[in-house]
Image (cartoon, grey):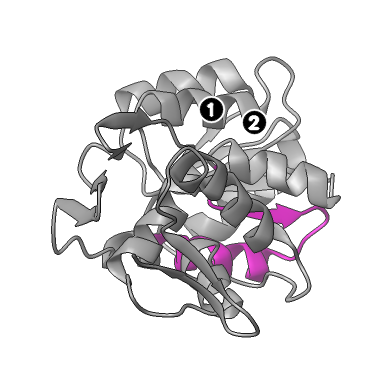
Amino acid sequence: MKLLIVEDEPNLSSIIRKGFSEKNHEVSVALDGTTALDLLSNHNFDVVVLDVMLPDINGIEICRRLRAAKNFVPILLLTALGSTENIINGLNSGADDYLLKPFKFLELDARVNALSRRAGQIQKPNEIITIADLQINSKTKSVSRNGDTIVLTAKEFKLLYYLAINSETILSREQLLDNVWDINFEMNTNVIDVYINYLRKKIDKPYETKLIHTMKGLGYVLKL
C-alpha cells in the first residue's frame, strides 16, 4: 500500500512509519495539515492515517476539504478525544474510521488493512441506482429526489449507498457497522441511529413517501 501518515509528534510518526515500512508499504509522512493537503493534491494514496490535533489545519478540516474536493481516499483518524460527540464529528467530516490514542500498532495495522481491503472490494453494479423518485449516482457521489439535489456528507452517502444496493433487504445494526464503519465499533454505540436520523431529515422528511424504514428489533431497510 501507499500510505500517508499525518502526525505532528515526531516520535509517534517515526514509530508508525517504521512499522508500516517493515511491512513493505510505501510510507509518506506529513507533520502538519498544510503539507498533508499538498501531498494529497499531488499524489494518490491508498489510506491516510490522520491525527486530529495538528498545529495548523486540524484533521477534521482536512477531511472536510478532501471530501468537498471529491477525494474519497480512506481516512483513519487518530484522536485522544473519545466522546461520542467527538467521534461522530470526525466521522461526519468524512473519515472512515477512528482509533483512540494511545493505541497498539497491531490494531492500527489491522484497521488500515481493513480500510484498504474494503476500498478494493467496493462493487458498483449500477452507476445510477433508482428507488422510487430517489436517484443515487455512485460515480459522482450525488443524490437527488424528485429532481431536487440532496447534499450528503461522505459518511451519509456511504450509508445511503449501502442501504440502496441492498434495497428491500433488512440490514441489522451489526451489518451496517461492519460494512459502513468497518471494524471494532462498540455494539452499544448510537452512531447508526444518529446517521439514520440525518438521512431521514434529508431523504424522507421533505417528501410524502418515506423510503427509510425501521424494522423493530431487526434493523433498517430502504424500500417503497
102 lies above or below 6: below
Asked if the magenta segment contains residue 20, the reply would be no
Which region shows up in magenta?
95-116
Amino acid under disc 1 = Arg
Q: Nearer the viewer, residue 51 or 140?
A: 140
Q: Quadrant of residue 90?
A: top right
**Residue in view at x 19 percent, y 60 percent:** 124
Q: State whether residue 33 appears in this view.
A: yes
Task: Please say if the residues under marks 1 and 2 sit with CB atoms less than 8 Å apart.
Answer: yes
Amino acid under disc 2 = Ile
Q: State whether residue 143 appears in this view.
A: no
**Residue in view at x 29 percent, y 66 percent:** 165
**Mark 1 lies on residue:** 64
* Outermost residue toward the front in this view: 208
Q: Nearer the viewer, residue 215 or 24?
A: 215
Tag 1, which secondary structure? helix
**Residue in view at x 78 percent, y 73 percent:** 188
**Mark 2 lies on residue:** 60
Image location of residue 130, percent across then percent down: 20, 54
